[in-house]
Amino acid sequence: MGKSITDKEQQVQYMKQRLNIFLEVLDAIEPESTELEDIDRLIAMVDELEDKMQQFNSRPSDEK
């Protein structure tokens, strides 16, 4: 597993990247052909983002 991100700037950059991925997936969805599984995956992505934010908020910071 990778090293934990404790630097706040790195955490923000990580979250921005993940949010951009989410937005790209959301933009690619065609409403007429969206399946329940697609909606479930979007919900899972939001849940993962929320979990990561909670992890970041509970970690000690490297900031001085």
Image (cartoon, rainbow, N blue to C red):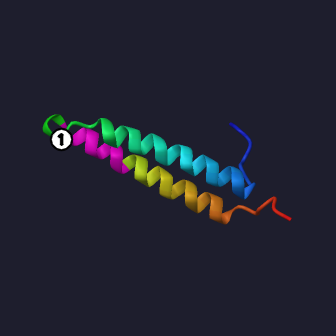
Left or right: 21 with respect to 29? Answer: right
Q: Residue at x 18, y 41 (%)?
A: 31
Whole-percent x and y of residue 5?
71, 49
Does 44 sit left or right of 15 as displayed?
left
Residue topped by disc 1: 31
Q: Position of residue 38 (x, y in %)?
A: 27, 39
Magenta stretch prevailing secondary structure = helix
**What residue is at 36 percent from the left and 38 percent from the top?**
25
Q: Please state which of residues 54 and 32 is positioned toward the viewer in this rendering.
A: 32
Residue farthest left in this picture: 32
Q: Quadrant of the N terminus?
A: top right
Image quadrant in which you'd find residue 27: top left
Q: Position of residue 21 (x, y in %)?
A: 46, 40
Q: Relative to 9, is 55 on the left or the right?
A: left
Residue 34 appears in which quarter of the rendering? top left
Q: Residue at x 27, y 45 (%)?
A: 39
Amino acid at the residue labelled 1 = Pro
Q: Is residue 15 magenta?
A: no
Nearer-the-camera pick, 27 or 38: 27
Which is more toward the observer, 47 or 13?
13
Does the magenta run of residues contain 36? yes
The answer to whether residue 45 is left or right of residue 64 is left
Q: Magenta segment range?
A: 34-43
Mark 1 closeness class: few <14, some 14–19, many ≥20 residues within 10 Å:
few
**Tag 1's secondary structure?**
helix
Q: How many marks?
A: 1
Q: Residue at x 81, y 62 (%)?
A: 63
User: Nearest the camera: 32 or 38?
Assistant: 32
* Viewport quadrant of the C terminus: bottom right
